[in-house]
Image (tube, rainbow, N blue to C red):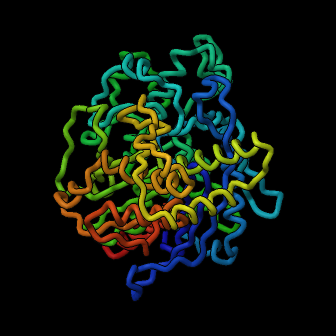
């Protein structure tokens, strides 16, 4: 099939869905142009009846609704030119569906769309149902990556060992408790499967590694380890290279022609890094809901094959058999959001009503005027994967450091220093990094956080190129197709 000049990139993130249209532009410095893009808040948070307050789940229907809204907002004449689709999304999470019944195509409205049908809620990477004790009871993975709560395989183990809760997913406590759903994947795998009408999902090694119990060197699941523990192996997707062809669209989708190539879904971390890492000597710092600091490891690098649950740096599959060294903190913009929510709630308790957006802007203004502080905040209110039981703390408290400016300054500094404790920034130099690219929604709207990043790094920091997983997903597929065409 001839490659058309426009590639669509989709990213199914934790809080929003994004779409971008890219066109190859050989004369442009980047080699491509972004023709149009769109983002929509998913607002998909859903109550977890099974896991209670520890559960973090999302309504798949709301995610797909946000996806449809993005597609509807893009120029329809450009969608007609789409020849390939790249997809990325939030890693680690798991959603279940029934083969052949996971969606229904609606073609009688303004545009052909698909709507979820026999689909569970998405248990996200933020899910906390797997305690340290529970994780310690699981079999040792044959992988260099440890298993943490929120990882797909850990979630499935939890559901197996808490079968009284399967009815939440329509799975009965009986020998046939998987009767309602017989396949599983990440939310991005689900979308690719629905677009192509595949009988089974195809998963990239990037997403497989994020589930746990996957060996990146052999490119295979730990089947023997999982089988011995009674794990439902039929839920594990087949593995393929990220961005390689998963299939083609089985229906016309908006104005995108039927038969359009769809790539195997990739992780949003890898797609985000790919969107802006101009040189292998760049490191990418992304502060959004959470925080990631990633650098490309040298060609030929292979991580040790023994997992270390206490290691703060993980090595994730990237592209072309390389790895990213990543410090991934659970505490980023969500910590600032928690602080804002706390302030709003305090004021509500005092009989005052204020908007969270107003509180956020005022506290950043106050911190910008407060250039320094002795107050120290360790902001790990969500713990960390390598330290799941760690809590936040405030120290060096004095009566002179209790203003809103002091506290906000200390909170922003604490987010950066927490990352430094996970991956000492001197290590980046030893890996050959020469520049740090700062990006992410929390960083772009927070001048104080930018100041603290510049204060902490001894390397040059550039805030000019923002990461965009939708652009990265499209770019992977675009370059892959161009290379195949040239060869």
Considering depth in this image, is 303 or 335 the residue closer to the camera? 335
Residue 481 figure quarter = bottom left
Whether 149 is drawn above or below 442: the answer is above
Extreme-top residue of the structure: 174
Quadrant placement of the C terminus:
bottom left
| Place of residue 250 in the rendered image (x, y in percent of width and height, measured from the top left) | 62, 55
Q: Residue at x 23, y 58 (%)?
A: 428
Q: Is residue 439 visible?
A: no
Residue 362 figure quarter = bottom right
Q: Residue at x 48, y 73 (%)?
A: 3
Give left or right: position of 281 versus 247. Answer: left
Extreme-bottom residue of the structure: 27
Q: Residue at x 36, y 69 (%)?
A: 484
| Place of residue 49 in the rendered image (x, y in percent of width and height, measured from the top left) | 68, 25
Q: How many labels sit on residues?
A: 0
Q: Is residue 98 visible?
A: yes
| Place of residue 246 in the rendered image (x, y in percent of width and height, measured from the top left) | 48, 52
Give left or right: position of 356 versus 326. Answer: right
| Place of residue 124 in the rendered image (x, y in percent of width and height, measured from the top left) | 55, 39
Extreme-front residue of the structure: 399
Q: Residue at x 40, y 80 (%)?
A: 31
Whether 201 is drawn above or below 451: the answer is above
Considering depth in this image, is 347 or 300 the residue closer to the camera? 347
């Amino acid at each position: 099939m001839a490659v058309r000049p426009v590639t669509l990139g989709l990213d199914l993130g934790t809080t929003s869905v994004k779409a971008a249209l890219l066109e190859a532009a050989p004369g442009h410095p980047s080699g491509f142009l972004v023709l149009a893009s769109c983002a929509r808040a998913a607002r998909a948070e859903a109550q977890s009846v099974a896991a209670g307050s520890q559960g973090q789940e999302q309504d798949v229907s709301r995610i797909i609704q946000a996806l449809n809204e993005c597609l509807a907002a893009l120029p329809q004449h450009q969608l007609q030119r789409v020849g390939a689709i790249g997809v990325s999304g939030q890693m680690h999470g798991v959603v279940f569906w029934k083969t052949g019944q996971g969606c229904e195509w609606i073609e009688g409205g303004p545009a052909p769309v698909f709507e979820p049908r026999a689909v569970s809620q998405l248990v996200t990477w933020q899910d906390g149902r797997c305690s340290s004790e529970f994780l310690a009871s699981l079999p040792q993975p044959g992988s260099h990556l440890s298993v943490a709560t929120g990882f797909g395989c850990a979630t499935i183990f939890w559901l197996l060992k808490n079968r009284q809760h399967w009815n939440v997913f329509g799975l009965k406590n009986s020998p046939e408790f998987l009767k309602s759903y017989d396949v599983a994947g990440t939310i991005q795998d689900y979308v690719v499967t629905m677009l192509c009408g595949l009988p089974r999902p195809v998963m990239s090694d990037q997403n497989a590694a994020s589930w746990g119990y996957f060996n990146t060197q052999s490119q295979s699941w730990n089947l023997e380890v999982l089988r011995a523990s009674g794990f439902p192996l039929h839920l594990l997707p087949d593995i393929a290279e990220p961005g390689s062809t998963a299939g083609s669209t089985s229906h016309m989708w908006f104005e995108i022609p039927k038969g359009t190539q769809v790539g195997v879904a990739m992780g949003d971390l890898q797609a985000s890094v790919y969107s802006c890492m101009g040189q292998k000597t760049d490191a990418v710092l992304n502060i959004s809901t959470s925080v990631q600091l990633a650098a490309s490891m040298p060609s030929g690098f292979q991580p040790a094959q023994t997992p270390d649950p206490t290691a703060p740096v993980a090595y994730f599959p990237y592209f072309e058999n390389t790895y990213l060294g990543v410090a991934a903190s659970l505490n980023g913009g969500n910590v600032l959001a928690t602080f804002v929510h706390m302030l709003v709630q305090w004021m509500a308790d005092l009989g005052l009503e204020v908007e969270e957006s107003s509180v956020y802007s005022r506290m950043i203004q106050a911190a910008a005027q407060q250039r320094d502080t002795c107050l120290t905040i360790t902001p790990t209110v969500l713990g960390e994967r390598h330290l799941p039981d760690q809590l936040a703390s405030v120290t060096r408290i004095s009566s002179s450091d209790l203003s809103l400016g002091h506290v906000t300054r200390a909170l922003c500094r604490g987010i950066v220093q927490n990352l430094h404790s996970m991956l000492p920034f001197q290590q980046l130099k030893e890996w050959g990094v020469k520049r740090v690219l700062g990006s992410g929604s929390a960083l772009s709207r927070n001048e104080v956080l930018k100041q603290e990043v510049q204060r902490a790094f001894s390397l040059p920091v550039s805030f000019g190129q923002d990461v965009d997983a939708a652009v990265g997903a499209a770019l992977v597929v675009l370059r892959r197709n161009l290379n195949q065409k040239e060869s």
